[in-house]
Amino acid sequence: MADIRYKQRKSSIVAKVAAVGCASIVLAGCIGFGIASAGGSAQEVDAFGIDAMSAPASDADSTTFAQSASDSSAREATVLVSTAKRDISKGIQAIEEQEEAERRAAEEAARAEEAARVAAAEAAKAEQQAKAAQDSAASALASLPDVDFSVGKEAFIAEWTQRIDAYLAGSPLAGQGVTFATAAWDNGVDPRWSPAISNTESSKGAHCFLPYNAWGWGDRSWSNWEDAINAHVAGLAQGYGYSITYANAAKYCPPNTDHWFNATLGQMQMI
């Protein structure tokens, strides 16, 4: 029995050694095939072990690695700069600003065009109204009796003194008929014009905005009615002419021409 156990133990050991040998052969074949596939050499096989992996890097290898890292950083910086240069946000902003400017310009042009149309329409309407008013004024003026200067100075002054005094009776200008009539003769002006304006502007001197200025005549003031009447009648002769017209009304009272013309003309017809 002892001999049999010894033989069996020996056979087991031989089998184990054989198995280990087979495994080593298989492992060596796999390693060789991998290196061959990677294009390696026998020397590379020898260097494949722990010694090759644990060998310290040389100074040349360190320098090469540092240079490589530096080159990589430089390439990254170049890429960043290039990317910044290719930033299209500024271009988009410029396009948007241009489009906004064009939109505003178009709106402004449309508003200007509309304002021009409105102005043209208003001008046409005003022109038509002026023509209608002038036609009406011409008709009204035709009803105003003429003043006869051919009677001579004395007769002229006598007639118009009486008529103007009757018109101014009871007002601050009462009794100034002779002053108006004489000034009208001297300046060749309709003797009814200045007295009628005094009613339109100040209710015949009752509401003067400056002393003795019954005609709303600029910024003038006087110390008595005689000087004031002579100045006003002379001013009418120099700046407006003989008598009332629609054009003279527009010049004398631009803000309210129609009313001023009709009111003054109506008063002249009463004298």
Image (tube, rainbow, N blue to C red):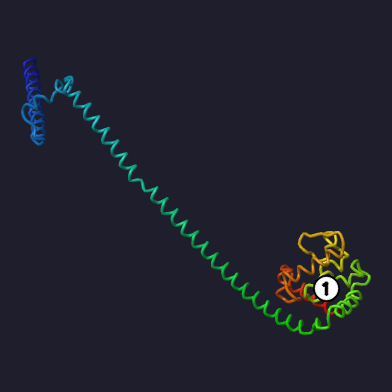
Q: In the displayed image of the protein, which residue is found farthest to the right?
A: 170
Which type of secondary structure does the marked residue at label 1 adopt? helix
Between 100 and 56, the one nearer to me in the picture: 100
Residue drawn at (32%, 42%), measured in percent from left and top? 83
Residue drawn at (6%, 30%), measured in percent from left and top? 41
Quarter in which the C terminus is drawn: bottom right
Which residue position is annotated with label 1?
196
Sort mark 1 into few (<14), some (14-19) or many (20+) by Cα contacts within 10 Å.
many
Between 106 and 199, the one nearer to me in the picture: 199
Residue drawn at (25%, 29%), measured in percent from left and top? 70
Q: In the displayed image of the protein, which residue is found farthest to the top?
A: 2
Residue 52: give x, y in percent of width and height: 14, 22
Q: Amino acid at mark 1?
A: Ala
Quarter in which the N terminus is drawn: top left
Please, is residue 271 above or below residue 86 in the view?
Answer: below
Residue 153: give x, y in percent of width and height: 84, 78
Q: Is residue 76 left or right of residue 202?
A: left
Between 169 and 19, the one nearer to me in the picture: 169
Q: Is residue 20 left or right of residue 80?
A: left
Question: Which of the 4 image quadrants contains residue 40?
Answer: top left
